[in-house]
Image (cartoon, grey):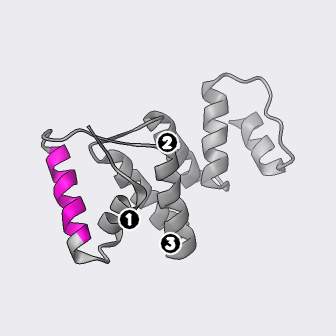
Amino acid sequence: MIFVDTNYFLRFLLKDIGSQYQEAKNLFLLAGKGEEELISSTVVFFEVFWVLRSTYGKDKQTLVEILDKLLKLNIEFDKHQLLVSSVHLFAEANLSLEDCYNLTFAREQNVKSFRTFDLKLAKEFRTG
């Protein structure tokens, strides 16, 4: 099993350093063929999001497309299904990805109440 860190994903997604892009692509292709088992973390997933948003200025629609593709690679993320659900909610709601993750997590845990001073988030919890 191989852990994949943030910079591997970024080089693959951005194709900005040719040799590193190719190395990452080759690893992901091997995983797609079942020849390597890859794993990563929720923290890495959010790091990819934050870097693409803040450093590279990707808009929400582009971020949703990239994150969706990332989750479809043959890489296991801890909380994989939670991330998938969060990205889908992020695509439709006027909330941050972090709020979508927390909201989805709370719903999966069957919480009765969601305490926040963020009125949009509170409303989404009640109506969702």
The tally of labels here is: 3
* Left-right relation of 18 to 96: left
- Judge by depth and name the residue closer to the eye, 4 or 125: 4
Q: Give the number of the mark in front: 1 or 3.
A: 1
**Residue at screen point 47% across, 51% down:** 45
User: Residue 21: where, in percent of width, then height?
Assistant: 25, 68
- Judge by depth and name the residue closer to the eye, 124 or 11: 11
Q: Amino acid at mark 3?
A: Lys
**Residue at screen point 29% across, 48% down:** 73
Q: Quick one: label 2, few (<14), some, or many (20+) residues within 10 Å?
A: many
Residue for badge 2: 83
Secondary structure of the residue carrying tag 1 is: helix
Q: Which mark is residue 58?
A: 3
Secondary structure of the residue carrying tag 3 is: loop
Q: Could you tell me if the residues under marks 1 and 2 are in contact, i.e. CB atoms within 8 Å? A: no
User: Residue 9: where, in percent of width, then height?
Assistant: 35, 59
| CA distance for labels 1 and 3 | 13 Å
**Residue at screen point 54% across, 54% down:** 91
User: Residue 36: where, in percent of width, then height?
Assistant: 18, 41
Q: Quick one: label 1, few (<14), some, or many (20+) residues within 10 Å?
A: many
| CA distance for labels 3 and 2 | 19 Å
Residue for badge 1: 10
Magenta segment range? 20-32
